Image (cartoon, grey):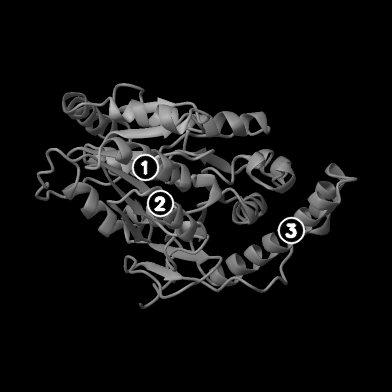
Amino acid sequence: MDPIKNSLASQRSLVFITAEYPFGKQETFIENEISLLSEAFDRIIVLPKSTPGSPRTMPSNCIIGTLYGSKYRSIGWRTLYQECFSVMGHWGKFKIAYRSWQSINKRLTQISTSTKGVLGELVYYSYWLDEGAMAAAFLAQRDGSFAISRAHGWDVYPVRHPHKYLPYRSYLANSDLVVCPISKHGAEALREQGFTNLDLFYLGAPQPKKVEVKNRQGTKTLVSISSCIELKRVQRIAAIFAALYQRDSTWRWNHFGDGPLEAEVKEWLDKSGAEGYIFHGRQSNETIHQWLSENANNTIFINQSTTEGLPVSMMEAMSVGIPCVGTNVGGVSEIIEDGNNGLLHDDGLSVETVAHLIEALDEDRLHSMAENAKNTWQNKFNAEKNHTAFLKRLT
């Protein structure tokens, strides 16, 4: 890919700070907005922190900048001293603050070397409210540029982290950085941390492709999409499926995603006697969308996480008319309307109770919920609409 010439001072460049996009298999949601971003800017300089595997295809005016690693640029010792003073007496938090300060410096170096010689206006966009956002906020304040960051889940809630601590929140909250949480719940959590320069923008799922939907009368299916980690409680989904299967062996379960607990969950299912489940492993967004579209009839999406931001996987399911069952955590209540487009329940509800709630959904209710799910997607979580609105904030 040929880099764009930067001789015109009127050009606008977006410095897009990511975790690993366009590498790896994470941050798949970026694929829903990168084309719109590429149309709005002359150049996009993508700056991943890690680079596993081969890069995905990007629009022609997107280039990958300098790799993350060096740390000779510095945000300054004063920033570190102030943060360490705020956590004085807590050695664990002190170590986190120091490691984060080092990472901020590496991000600063990555940005500075990647934009050296680039003329025209620079806009900084961090996909996560982390060290990349810190570097963007620092540079924007120094240079008078515009900086913006999304804020999802792990980068919003300190409770998810060791010592219930996220470093440099005061610095970020008092900077000129525009912070865009993806849920109302996240926005409220950030306000409690002192953030005021907030602008809510939902993520979204793309318009589903027209496919032939399989006729699956007489069979109901659970589908889940997540990593097999403790937070996602895939083992609890397995227990709910097993409870349904024991009473009706026509139930099926399809799971997309892998992780350290996958083997343990499969072993438990084998011992339970449940059959009719498939672990598809980690799949591309396109493969998952295709499966959801083809298998929308009599299918229920299920999520049993202990904490969430606002799951895009639910938006994807609803876009093809799949009702959702989920725990009332994070921003999940902003997408599931209990009894209307799915079932929303307390995260402490027993496995048997959740199974009974699902079992009670006859085909008429499922059909009604499916139509309401599609409407929810169209009205609130249409990717093109939501990303276009976010783009206006950037430009």
Horizontal and vertical percent position of residue 45: 46, 65
Q: Residue tagged by mark 2?
A: 269
Q: Is residue 153 above or below residue 92?
A: above
Q: Residues within 10 Å of mark 3 (few under 14, many from 20)?
A: many
**Residue drawn at (68%, 62%), measured in percent from left and top?**
103
Circle count: 3
| Distance from the alpha carbon under mark 2 to that under mark 1 | 7 Å
**Quadrant hosting residue 31:** bottom left
Q: Is residue 361 above or below residue 179?
A: above
Horizontal and vertical percent position of residue 84: 84, 49
Q: In this view, does 286 lie to the left or right of 356?
A: left
Q: Residue tagged by mark 1?
A: 242
Q: Is residue 195 above or below residue 80?
A: above
SS at badge 2: helix
Q: How crowded is mark 2: few (under 14 residues within 10 Å), some or many (20 or more)?
A: some
| Distance from the alpha carbon under mark 1 to that under mark 3 | 47 Å
Which residue sits furthest top? 339
Q: Is residue 40 visible?
A: no
Q: Which of marks 3 and 2 is nearer the N terminus?
A: 3
Q: In this view, does 120 lie to the left or right of 354?
A: right
- Asked if the residue at tag 1 contacts the one at tag 2, i.e. Cβ–Cβ closer than 8 Å, the answer is yes
Q: Which of marks 2 and 1 is nearer the N terminus?
A: 1
SS at badge 3: helix
Horizontal and vertical percent position of residue 241: 35, 41
Q: Earlier in the sequence, mark 1 or mark 3?
A: 3
Three-letter residue code for mark 2: Leu
SS at badge 1: helix
Q: Can residue 152 be seen in this view?
A: yes
Q: Residue tagged by mark 3?
A: 101
